[in-house]
Amino acid sequence: MSSGNARRNATIDEALVDSEKRYASANPKSLARHLAAIKYLPGGNTRTNMYFSPFPVTMMRGEGARLHDLDGHAYTDLLGEYTAGIFGHSHPRLRAAIVEALDGGLNLGAPNRWEGELGRLMCERFPSLDKVRFCNSGTEANLYAVTAARACTGRTHVLVFDGAYHGGLLSFVSANPMQAPFPYVIGQYNDLEGCVALIAQHAHELAAVLIEPMVGSGGGISADRAFLAMLREESKRHGFVLIFDEVMTSRLAPGGLQSKLGITPDMTSFGKYLGGGMSFGAFGGADWIMARFDPAASGSFVHSGTYNNNTLTMAAGVVGLRDVYTPEACAKLNARGDRLREQANAIFQKRGVAMQMLGQGSLNVIHMHRRPLRRPTDVVSDPRRQALFHLEMLERSFFLSRRGLSALCLPLTDKDVDAFIDAVDDFCAIHRPLLQDDAV
Ligand SMILES: Cc1ncc(COP(=O)(O)O)c(C=O)c1O
């Protein structure tokens, strides 16, 4: 593995300045596009987490597990579109399904031949689903799940966890003036005793608890099984709805993380890859809740949405879940991710650097310190170290997020994983003196 042009520096700041200079000079066309977009899009983009300093590269196309940018660089795609891109780029079976749907007329204004099948596939896969409804994003899925829980229980409050991310309008990562205006009770993730006390205090007004069974993009931090089992027990005891946000984690086992844990929530929200790479969200759960969405019943809940059953998503979703992300493919991909994490952590240990990779299966996050992480609020990292690692991975042709998220896609090979591990080793060897301590 070549170490690119990276060289040893005396300080992190110096190393970052060097790295940013190399990045800017290697990506003049991306910079020009970014500067042109800034005139019309705040910050030059339309998805906050796409931005990174000094400016993001512009992607032109993808192919299998490769991405190609505007300045002609090719990357191994380790980000997998934040878990939505599990199939890789232009998977032939998905492409064929999308083209067929396209040729059949896009907007039919009626139920189509795919949506019932996608519903069946999902209900058969995920234990908590008696019935399911589709929408257009994970954020929307969570908004529907929470509002359904409030409507069904006649209560108001929603228990969420400090530092959790459930979409732009449901982000508890930092102060969020754009929060969907529900009354929240904020608990600490994995704090069993504290949350039991909080629940006892608010039991009469709690409509739901919304939790990601492993914090995905925010850190790859797994909930203790005992913590989730407590939430399951308490929600039954006090009559509030347990909602698992499996927008990211549903990929971790054929029946989602809920099946791996053996804990079945009342409702689950989904999104990302389950739409076959097209815009997608879904929420579903127990019949006593989902039956309220039956439009033939009197007083049913209104859940409309022009694109809820859009033909491209429905067609791609069916083929993706039925034919491509089979239980066998799921097991293989997650085993590859487990190996990647083990190898990365072995490198960090061998090089004696303050880094760690956390996660499960194909969904992992690299942290630039080695402090134990029990909850999202423990994720306090030095943005300069994150930027240095990220830019130097780009320089070595590996694409992952600024915060170190990687979500493996199906076309990646063991050779790709080995090459990434070599790149990480090279980075650690060069910058070892700057990565010794946890001090941030
Ligand atoms: C756990 C979780 N929930 C919800 C969402 C929101 O999904 P979307 O971006 O499709 O609105 C995300 C997005 O990354 C997520 O990670």
Image: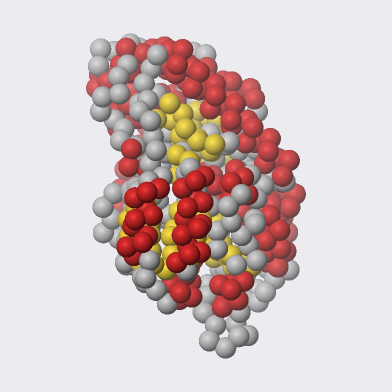
Residue positioned 58% across, 30% down in the render: 338
* Position above or below: 237 against 19: below
Q: Is residue 385 visible?
A: yes
Q: Is residue 358 left or right of residue 370?
A: right
Q: Position of residue 155 (x, y in %)?
A: 39, 74
Residues 28 and 347: in front is 347
Residue 334 lies, with reference to residue 432, above or below; the image says below
Nearest to the observer: residue 172 or residue 195: 195
For the C terminus, the image quarter is top left
Front position in the image: 23 or 416: 416
Based on the displayed image, in which of its 4 quarters is residue 413 positioned? top right
Q: Quadrant of residue 366?
A: top left
Q: Position of residue 18 (x, y in %)?
A: 30, 20
Asked if 177 appears above or below 156 in the picture, the reply is above
Give the total of numbered labels: 0
In this rendering, the answer to whether 190 lies above or below 111 is above
Residue shown at the point (45%, 16%) measured from the top left: 349
| Residue 423 makes an appearance in the image | no
In the image, is 394 to the left or to the right of 312? left
Q: Residue at x 46, y 38 (%)?
A: 220
Residue 25 image position (x, y, % from top left): 35, 25
